[in-house]
Amino acid sequence: MDDLLKELNQFRAKFPKELVMYYPYPAQKEALAKGEIKLYRNDRGEIDGYVWVKNLKTKGVSRIEEIYSLKRGLGSIMMEDAKRFAAFNIIELKVLDFNERAIGFY
């Protein structure tokens, strides 16, 4: 588990710091253990992207905590997977107001 978490954080380091939410290590580890994070790997076994969907039972909402991709076209696949992982009809996603690429995509 710790090796996977380390690999995940190395992948996240490829993105500009202002675009990455930095959740504490225990939250990431718990999400991996619960199966809330789905990794997408390339032919070499390296992470090309991941989506973290958290189902908030008390609010009746599924939230995409993080979604990052390096591979063109992977974002659409990850969004479809996120819909399948969602336990609720309402899916919440927050995008930073200056992240124009993400705003255009979503």
Image (cartoon, rainbow, N blue to C red):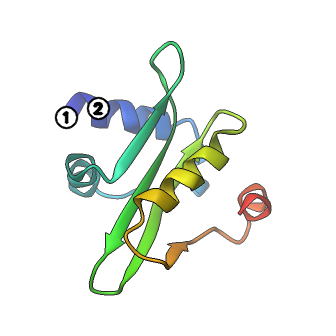
Which quadrant would the C terminus be assigned to in this image? bottom right
- Which residue is rendered at x = 41% and y = 58% of the image? 85
Q: What is the x, y in percent for residue 60? A: 36, 84
Q: Position of residue 74 (x, y in %)?
A: 64, 39
- The image quarter containing residue 87 is bottom left
- Looking at the image, can residue 65 be seen? yes
Identify residue for label 2: 4
Q: Residues within 10 Å of mark 1 (few under 14, many from 20)?
A: few
Q: Is residue 61 left or right of residue 5?
A: right
Marks 1 & 2, CB-CB < 8 Å contact: yes
User: Amino acid under label 1?
Assistant: Met
Q: In this image, 69 relative to 21: left or right?
A: right
Q: Residue at x 53, y 15 (%)?
A: 43
Residue matched to label 1: 1
Residue name at image x 47 percent, y 64 percent: 64
> Where is residue 71 shown, x and y percent of the image?
66, 33
Tally the marks: 2
Mark 2: which amino acid? Leu
Residue positioned 36% across, 48% down in the render: 37
The answer to whether 63 appears left or right of 93 in the picture is left
Viewer can see residue 21:
no
